[in-house]
Image: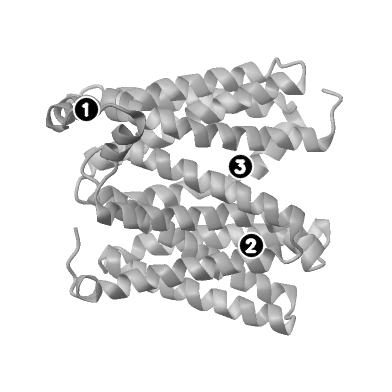
Amino acid sequence: MFGCTLGEVQWTISAYIGGFAVGGLFLGPLADSLGAVRVAVWCLIGFSAASLGSIWMTNIYMLLILRTFAGFVGSGVYLGAMGIVKNVYAGKSVKAMSLIDSIQMFAPLLAPSLGQVLNRYLGWQANFAFLAWYGLVLSFCIFVHFRRNAQVVNHAAGLKQQRPKPRKGLILSMYQRLPGRDALVYGLLGVCCSATFFSYLSIASHAYIFRLGVSEEDFTFYFNFGVFGVFLGVLANMYALRCLQPTQVLFYEGLLCFTAAVALVICLACQAPVIVYSIGLAVLLAGNAATRSNSIGLAIAFADQNISFFMGLTSFVALSLGALIGGLLSHYSTYSLECVIGLALMTHFVSLSVQLSKRHFVFSGKCA
């Protein structure tokens, strides 16, 4: 319809991810100042408007602009949700984040099938029409649910009185917004896990088709196998938090990821069958996703204020690193799969080291 190549169409995905990454730097502080609920509702309305406008685009460049804007305001919805978790589920943010991640993982399982059905029977424009409708309905539900809870909607007012007056200068102002050391440690661990996952998404087709010799038809099966592992990982994390402390669960998740990464390195060296790689990657991705969910929950629990700014900053770093690492590996390295496994191995080795350095804190049952 647009008379462009498939590669140019794929840029719409990169445009959305890029807008999402940049949006976190601007909409995070805005959510801390104006209130998470307000920002989430207005960003959902903007997302619906961008999706609705995409239906009537006449060329690929206009569509790229609207998809970038949709990603930009979409980050505000995500960051608004993090602020709501901090204020509504104070003291239980780890379990709340685990539940939210479990629900979110339905998206990569259901969205491709739903998109194919809409595209086949109603045309590609139906995908954007559905997104616009979904955004408007969700914004209305959030507004109705929180309109009577003035303490949550206007939570920024009390925080403003407690915050010290920021110093002059952008760098000093951003530095003052950062949370304490424990929140930074767990936030950086979440960044590394997210970067590992986004790197895998970027190199998956290259690794399976060119590195492991899988056909394009079979690639979908193996890729969905890994996505299903991610869903099971966050689901298992949610149930594990019912009987164990978050720091204990985090330790065992790091141990699982480290073991799976070592097993994958051995399988690559021995040239094992593709199904063995898929099982190992599914286990690694499951543990990695669970670790990410737990780490973000702990970071929110330890952060006393400016949580939306902090999550926006970590999202920007994670998305940028994941896209950059995955893009470089898929274009310039034959051993992209080994590099991503090495990144996961290093990430969870550091995670285990941090947890073992707090051995009494981890195994004594004490937790924030």
| Residue 11 pos. (x, y %) | 71, 35
Tag 3, which secondary structure? Answer: helix
Residue 57 is marked as none
> Residue 70's quadrant in the figure?
top right
Whole-number angstrom distance, CA of label 2 to CA of label 1: 42 Å
Judging by the rendered image, the residue that carries numbered circle 1 is: 156
Q: With respect to residue 296, does 263 lie above or below?
A: below
State the residue position of label 3. Answer: 111
Secondary structure beneath label 1 = helix
Q: Which residue is mark 2?
A: 225
Disc number lying in front (2 or 1): 1
Structural distance between the alpha carbons of marks 3 and 1: 35 Å
Q: Nearer the viewer, mark 3 or mark 1?
A: 1
Q: Nearer the viewer, residue 327 or 70?
A: 327
Please state which amino acid type lies under the numbered disc 2: Phe
Q: CA distance from mark 3 to mark 2?
A: 15 Å
- Residue 150 picture quarter: top left
- From the viewer's side, name the closer residue of 78 and 72: 72
